[in-house]
Image: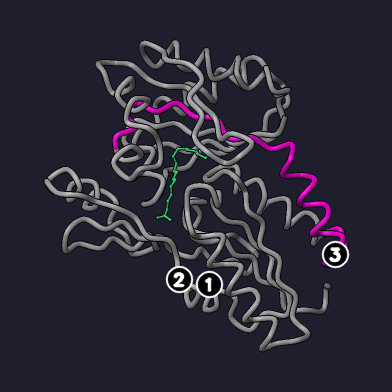
Amino acid sequence: MNQCKIKLVADSSINLLTYEGIDFASVPMRVVAGDNEYVDDAALDLPAMLKGLKEHKGKSSTACPSVGDWLNAFGDADVVLGVTITSNLSGCYNASQVAARQYMKKHPDAKVFILDSLSTGPEMHLIIEKYIELIGQGLSFEEIVEAIQRYSKKTHLMFSLSSLSNFAKNGRISPAVAAAVGLLNIRIVGKASDEGTLEPMHKCRGEKKALAQLLSCMEAVGFKGGKVHLSHTYNLEMAERFAEMLRQKYADIKLTIRQNLGLCSYYAEEGALMVGFEG
Ligand code: X90
């Protein structure tokens, strides 16, 4: 493995554009509102996208990367390792698998493995980080594939959102569930289910209660500190407040905070906080 050209890939719902010291490609999703198409790459003007969406009165939607987009991301690597958003809410994983088969047909010596995260955002970040660790340990391709699948069973994604309206409008959650959120100051605390769908767990009034609920939900699935990735949509304050709560309670916390990029900002909406962690 160490002599081969290795490429790590993920769709842009990972909220990372580059990865220091690693050949990494983020494959952009798209947000479409009327004649405007916002490509979720390094050139995206996020405030302009959110402003455009607010002003846009008609329908808006998203599109996952094409097979060609994935092939571009693979470049000319000998080994491709990747992760996608849940196949239960997006065609992204499917497109990546078609690309993987085409790539290996054209390059019979190449190896490609892309994991369906059954999740998104910061949980995908944990997966990419784990790939890097496994490569560093000098494992074979097959060993890495086995280890990453095992690892992904103990990672989780939970979140606190103040609106589910884009989720509902795009048929990715029932309108009845969405209607219960977005009322004044009501947030949901939920998780990515084992099937890779959005599972609301609690309705909370205000951020403070939502954060307390979020932490107790994390603890209920075995959170005991360790690695945590937070991402937010224009709510750094809430992310920092939560980071502080975690640090106060757990001595051993390795935490990052980042801004949601285009795709997660569209669905998680303004004010959102997403948490990827190990159980
Ligand atoms: O293929 C496409 O057009 C993309 C569809 C993506 C739909 C889901 C986006 C989720 C973004 C929202 C909060 C966390 C929900 C977790 C559910 C597994 C993030």
Whether the residues at callouts 1 and 2 have beta carbons within 8 Å, the answer is yes
Give the CA separation, mark 2 to mark 3. Answer: 26 Å
Q: Mark 2 or mark 3, which has the lower sequence index?
A: 2
Number of residues whose C-alpha sits closer than 10 Å to that of mark 2, classed few (under 14), some (14–19) or many (20 or more): some
Q: Which residue is mark 2?
A: 66
In magenta segment, residue 211: no
Residue on which disc 3 sits: 142
Total numbered circles: 3
Image position of 181 with respect to 59: above or below: above
The disc placed on residue 186 is: none
Task: Give how far across and how far down residue 21 sits, in percent.
Answer: 64, 64
183 and 10: which is toward the camera: 183
Q: Give x and y (percent) for residue 149.
A: 76, 50
What residue is shown with label 1? 70
The color scheme shown is one colour
Which residue shows up at 29% across the image and 51% down it?
46
Residue drawn at (48%, 25%), measured in percent from left and top? 200
Image quarter in which the C terminus is found: top right
Q: State which tag comes first along the sequence, 3 or 1.
A: 1
- Indicate the amino acid at tag 3: Glu
Q: Report the magenta residues as a range.
A: 137-165
**Along the line of sight, the residue nearer the viewer: 92 or 7:** 92
Q: Say whether marks 2 and 3 touch (CB < 8 Å).
A: no
Q: Name the amino acid, label 2.
A: Ser
Question: Is residue 105 depicted above or below 138 in this figure?
Answer: below
- Residue nearest the observer in this picture, 24 or 190: 190
Distance Cα–Cα, label 1 vs label 2: 7 Å
